[in-house]
Structures are given as C-alpha cells and as structure tokens.
C-alpha cells in the first residue's frame, strides 16, 4: 500500500515541519495515490490555517516509521509504552495501545499522544492488513491515550468513549496541547489536534468486528471520571486503560475512593490476560492490581490521618508524600506524581 505524505509546517514562527500521513490518500499503487494527492492535501490544509504544506508524495508503507506491535494473543496486538511520566519521556509515547482484528474490521484501543504516534500506529496496522478500521476506543481523556485519534477518524473509524469523556476532554484540550508543545520537539506534535468521540457509552456496549465481539464498559469515577474498559471476548484480553497501572506510579485524577472500590469489585471477571494502561501485560489479575491497590490504600490512609489531625493541605501534602516513601523504589516517576496524588486525595477526602 502507498500512503500520501505531505510536508507540513507551522505557518508562523521559526521553520518547523513534520511529515503528515493523510489516510484519505491511501492507494494500492503509487500511480493511483499520485492521481489524487494534490486535491486531498489541499482539502486537508484548507481547514487548518495555522499550517502550510508542501511537496505531497506517495510513499510505500514499508518506507514509513511504524510503532512496534506485539501479537499478545491471536489477532490482538499491543504497543507497549515506556512506563514513565511524560516529563521523563522524549516523545510522550508512554501509554499502552491495542489493535484487535476481526474478520471484517479492526478496532484500535487508544491512539497515543500525538498525530505522529497515531500515524505510526496506522502504518503498523496497514503493514498487517488493509481491513477498515471501524472503531477507535478511547479508554479515558488523558493526552497520552487520545491525541493521536484524528488519524483514525480520518481513516474512517467511529470514536467510542465513556459518555463523560467528551466534556472532560474539551475542558482540558488547551492545556493538553500546550503541554505536548512544551515537552516535545515540534516534529512530534505538529498537526496534533483533538478528535472528540462520536459515541458515548453510558454503561455497557459492544462492538462487532466480524466474528469478534469487543465488550465495552463505562465505570463510575475512579482513575478519571470517564474510564472505559474493553474486553476482547474471543481471547479474554482485558484492556483496562489507566484503571490499572503497573511500573508507573498511579495518577489519581477522578476519585480515590471510587478507584479503591473498583479494584475491590473483581472487575476483570473471567479475563485471561490484562493489558494495563502502563506497564507489562499479565495473565494474573492479582499481580496486575495488588501493588497499585496497596499504594492507593496507603495514600488514602495517610491522607485521612492528616485530615483527622487538622493539618491544612499545603502542610499535609509533603508529609503524606514522606509517609509513602517506602513505595518509591517499586514505581517509576514516583516523586513527581506522589505530591499531586496527595493533593487530589486531600481535596476529595476532606469532605468525607
Ligand atoms: Zn490516565
């Protein structure tokens, strides 16, 4: 397969450019791709006045950068992110992503941190199959999971997420885009924009990929207020999003009490393999969730103790962080996350 690539630059400021892959330009032959490339490039740029584009060309799939996908189960592929915080990453590609292939179509689970990563997932998928990408499932609003979504939308995917995700993401869009622009070189973020969900899941839903059913479930507030899990019924692969962290320090951005009760509720059911939002997949639910549960419980206990002593938040946060110091060796990016978690926990639990 050939892909349309346009060299896209920021219209203002110093010359910063990056290659954009426009899925609408895909074609089986280079000639077919070239016959429509200028029109497709012009249409894409027409809606983006902050960008300019030059030199459209048609490139063989094999010559483009792709993320490394690992076949974890038959027709279930995973990209495993580097389990550190964005601030400690050179490109923000820290989240785990999934690709599930049915007889008729593909579902992608999370889209990565940028258009560049979304493109690299897309190239990796097209290296395996030319089946349509019917669905992009977003597990929650966080930027490392959602900012590559526009590539899948342009490829024709319906974006599915928790019903509360759209509002939550719109509220934070400006901050998320500023953050990736501050943290990463322009080649990583040029062309990145938010794509909002087309379908909101309120409780249970399922998607059919042709002989393959993926069950979706929207949960009450836990890691965030818009967490959604996806279960590939055929293989029992359970994509938890950031409801499960391994290796990377868990981030509380929803409800600590809600998250602890989610962990108590045996949410993995009959799942045979768990793909966390960060860290190594595992077949063992206990191994997947117990270290995180212990950390979150200790966070809740330490926070409640300081609130009971009447210590104000600004003084309590460093004390809580110190109380949790024994967890630090087991978790990446601990110091930068624990104070933020203590702040979130204090704000939530002081109203109990
Ligand atoms: Zn998250």
Image (spheres, grey):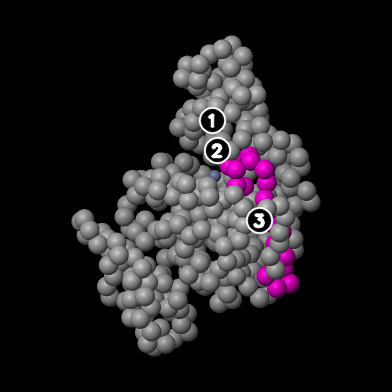
Q: Is residue 99 left or right of residue 10?
A: right
Give the mark nearer the N terminus: 2 vs 3.
Answer: 3
Circle number at residue 253 = 2
Residue beneath disc 3: 201
Circle number at residue 344 = 1
The alpha-carbon separation of the residues under discs 2 and 3 comes to 20 Å
Q: Residue at x 75, y 63 (%)?
A: 234
Residue 101 in the image, given as x and y percentages of width and height: 64, 69
* Secondary element type, mark 1: helix
* Above or below, 297 relative to 57: above
- Label 1: few (<14), some or many (≥20) within 10 Å? some
Q: For marks 2 and 3, give the one nearer the viewer.
A: 3
> Is residue 250 in view?
no
CB at disc 2 and ligand 1 closer than 8 Å:
yes
Q: Residue at x 59, y 28 (%)?
A: 348
Q: Quadrant of the C terminus?
A: top right
Q: Residue at x 45, y 76 (%)?
A: 24
């Amino acid at each position: 397969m050939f892909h349309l690539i346009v060299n896209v630059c920021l219209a203002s400021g110093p010359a910063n450019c990056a290659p954009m892959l426009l899925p609408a330009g895909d074609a089986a032959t280079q000639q077919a791709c070239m016959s429509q490339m200028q029109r497709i490039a012009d249409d894409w740029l027409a809606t983006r006045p902050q960008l300019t584009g030059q030199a459209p060309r048609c490139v063989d799939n094999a010559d483009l950068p792709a993320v490394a996908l690992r076949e974890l189960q038959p027709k279930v592929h995973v990209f495993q992110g580097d389990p550190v915080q964005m601030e400690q990453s050179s490109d923000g590609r820290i989240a785990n992503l999934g690709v599930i292939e049915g007889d008729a179509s593909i579902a992608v689970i999370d889209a990565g941190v940028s258009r560049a990563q979304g493109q690299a997932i897309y190239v990796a998928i097209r290296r395996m199959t030319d089946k349509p990408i019917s669905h992009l499932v977003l597990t929650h609003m966080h930027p490392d999971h959602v900012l590559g979504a526009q590539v899948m939308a342009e490829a024709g995917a319906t974006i599915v997420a928790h019903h509360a995700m759209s509002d939550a993401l719109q509220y934070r869009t400006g901050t998320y885009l500023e953050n990736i622009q501050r943290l990463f070189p322009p080649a990583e973020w040029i062309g990145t924009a938010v794509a909002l969900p087309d379908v909101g899941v309120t409780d249970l839903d399922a998607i059919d990929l042709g002989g393959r059913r993926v069950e979706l479930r929207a949960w009450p507030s836990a890691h965030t207020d818009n967490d959604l899990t996806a279960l590939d019924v055929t293989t029992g692969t359970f994509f938890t999003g950031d409801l499960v962290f391994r290796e990377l320090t868990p981030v509380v951005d929803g409800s600590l009490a809600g998250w602890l009760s989610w962990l108590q509720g045996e949410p993995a059911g009959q799942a045979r393999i768990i793909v966390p939002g960060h860290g190594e997949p595992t077949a063992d639910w206990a191994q997947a969730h117990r270290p995180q549960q212990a950390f979150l419980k200790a966070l809740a206990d330490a926070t409640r103790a300081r609130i009971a002593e009447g210590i104000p938040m600004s003084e309590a946060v460093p004390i809580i962080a110190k109380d949790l110091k024994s967890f630090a060796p087991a978790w990446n990016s601990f110091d930068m996350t624990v104070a933020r978690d203590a702040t979130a926990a204090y704000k939530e639990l002081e109203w109990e």
